[in-house]
Image (tube, rainbow, N blue to C red):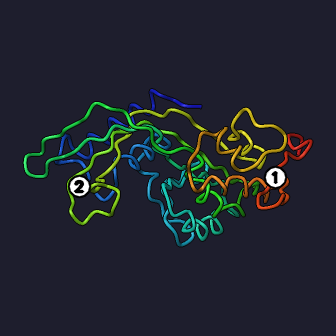
Amino acid sequence: MIDRTAFNVARARALAENGEGYAGIGRLSEKTLHRTLKLYFEPDGQKHEIEFLGSVADIKNECGIVEIQRAAFSYLTPKLNRFLPHCPVTVVHPIVAKKRVKRLDPESGEISFSGRTVKGKTVFDSALEIYKIREFIGREGFTLVLLLLDCDEYRIPDKSARRGRGGERRLEAIPNEIIVEYVLKSPTDYLTLMPEGLSDSFTEAEFRAAAKSRSRYAYYYLRLLVDLKLLHRERDGRKYIYSRIKNELSC
């Protein structure tokens, strides 16, 4: 359940620690988004960055371990294999679902903003990352939390930036609020991400249309449900037909 008061307190603390304005944006090794979520899930800083079994946990408290991971889920595998036999582990995955792009002038520190809110990513953009840790889904003590966030994304001119950014480099995303929270514990919890309006049998194209997703990674969500034995897949010519498995909610 989202605690908006606690989130606002955590955000204010993170911003205060990093410093106001241009001087504080993108300058510290721990970004504001990561710091905010650490303070949100555990306000006591003494329980952050705890060494345990040869690794460092983002948070370790009386409830277990919390790892905040925005990308590169494959790096979580060694930690999860070490931690889970000893205590519960919650992996928190922030997803920037809505953002306002703000540009910084590196010389003056002036911030410009077009005034437009841009649609960001969906849970299906993260499907490949989730798929990388599928072996832990359903294991005792493992929880995945997906947080869809509203953020301000700060960028700075950079001629060496990769193509598609228009010669800009992202410094960091500063969270404003949590829009939606998905807490996924059991395999059947992953069915809650399914879009409405699908029949019992459907194609990947029909799934994408219902999900309003253009993500090239959406396929991995369907593949995940097949691996979890929540969907059945069979080939029909050059395409696959996905079917809901009866009684899946009672599994």
Label disc, if present, on residue 124 of the rendered structure: none
Where does label 2 land, which residue?
Answer: 27
In the picture, measured across the screen, residue 116 lies left or right of residue 63, that is left
Local secondary structure at mark 1: strand
In the picture, measured across the screen, residue 161 lies left or right of residue 130, that is left
For disc 2, the neighbor class at 10 Å (few under 14, some 14 to 19, many from 20) is some
Q: Residue lying furthest left in this view?
A: 108
Is the N terminus in the top left, top right, bottom left or bottom right quadrant?
top right
Q: Which amino acid does label 1 sit on?
A: Ile
Mark 2 to mark 1 CA distance (whole Å): 49 Å
Q: Residue placed at 63% from the left, 49% from the top?
A: 144
Q: Where is residue 7 in the image (x, y as percent from the top left)?
A: 44, 33
Q: Residue placed at 26% from the left, 40% from the top?
A: 16
In front of the other: 20 or 198: 198
In the picture, measured across the screen, residue 84 lies left or right of residue 47, that is right
Q: Residue lying furthest top in this view?
A: 5
Where does label 1 land, which residue?
Answer: 241
Q: Where is residue 219 in the image (x, y as percent from the top left)?
A: 66, 55
Q: Where is residue 101 in the image (x, y as percent from the top left)?
A: 31, 41
In front of the other: 136 or 61: 136
Q: Quadrant of residue 113?
A: top left
Local secondary structure at mark 2: loop
Q: Residue lying furthest front in this view?
A: 237
Q: Residue placed at 60% from the left, 45% from the top?
A: 145
Q: Earlier in the sequence, mark 2 or mark 1?
A: 2
For disc 1, the neighbor class at 10 Å (few under 14, some 14 to 19, many from 20) is some
Mark 2 or mark 1, whichever is nearer to me: 1
In front of the other: 57 or 112: 112
